[in-house]
Amino acid sequence: MNNLRTYKPPINLLAGRVILVTGATKGIGRSISNSLIRHGATVVIHGRNTDALNAFSDEYKDLDLKPDVVTLDLENTNEKDYQKLSERLLSEYGRLDGLLHNASILGSRKPIENYSSDEWHKVIQVNLNSAFMLTQSLLPLLHNSSDASMVFTTSGVGNRGRANWGAYCVSKFGIEGLAQTLADELKDTNIRVNYLDPGATRTDMRHAAYPDEDPESLPTPESLLGSYLYLLGPKSKGMNSIRVIA
């Protein structure tokens, strides 16, 4: 499914909704978080750098829209850390209406033959295992919502393997499998699960993957806002297990 980029949401689209975004301090995650806030959501922003998160949050301190901050190093976080987060959010909000899994790392662009096991495990841990653990810990809060949406950011290498994409490619295959499995398990509940391939976008990760590419030739993360807002908002109710190409 595609053509959601042109979606023009009403300014109050997400009023009253509580949404957590992982990888929110830069790139796609930051742009989406800004847009969610502007469209009325109470946003919980996640990252691994507390200073960066607080600086982002402070941009809204005079507007009564300041997002909540969650600092977690996805490489080293354990089940107890996720449980503490779940308990904190339950105490503060009582529910989650949206969860955007956006955090990921690229890893090295090299053949599998030359990949180190340490780097492999790191990429899989950050990109895939953490998504499983976070989802599992937050599902009770999503069940507390009357209309919850879970969205995973995938990739063009998430359903077709390509040389030299190593653990990143495998992790995105896993993300699509996780999304599909959750969607099937939750299909008769209040939670819908979809996944979005943003395509070539002007981000630091894209530049790291294609250093010779002119960033100015690529669309900005802001061009994706319509797709993400549609999926995280009430208009997507009834959509489940859909791979959206932004």
Image (cartoon, rainbow, N blue to C red):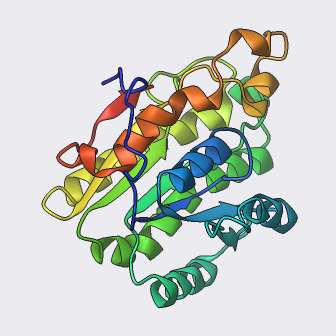
- Outermost residue on the left side: it is 188
| Residue 27 point in image, percent of width and height | 70, 39
In the figure, 73 relative to 85: above or below? Answer: above
**Residue at 60% in and 31% down:** 222
Tell me: 61 left or right of 132: right
| Residue 5 point in image, percent of width and height | 43, 25
Tell me: 237 left or right of 200: left
In the figure, 206 relative to 186: above or below? Answer: above
Tell me: 191 left or right of 151: left
Residue 111 or residue 240, whichever sits in front: 240
**Residue at 73% in and 67% down:** 62
- Outermost residue on the front side: it is 62
Q: Quadrant of the N terminus?
A: top left
**Could one spot residue 25 in this view of the protein?**
yes
Residue 91 or residue 60, whichever sits in front: 60
**Residue at 66% in and 52% down:** 23
**Could one spot residue 110 in this view of the protein?**
no
| Residue 230 point in image, percent of width and height | 36, 40
| Residue 189 point in image, percent of width and height | 17, 64
**Residue at 57% in and 45% down:** 32
Q: Quadrant of residue 187?
A: bottom left
Q: Quadrant of residue 17?
A: bottom left
Q: Quadrant of the C terminus?
A: top left
Count the marks: 0
Q: Quadrant of residue 163?
A: top right
In the figure, 135 relative to 158: above or below? Answer: below
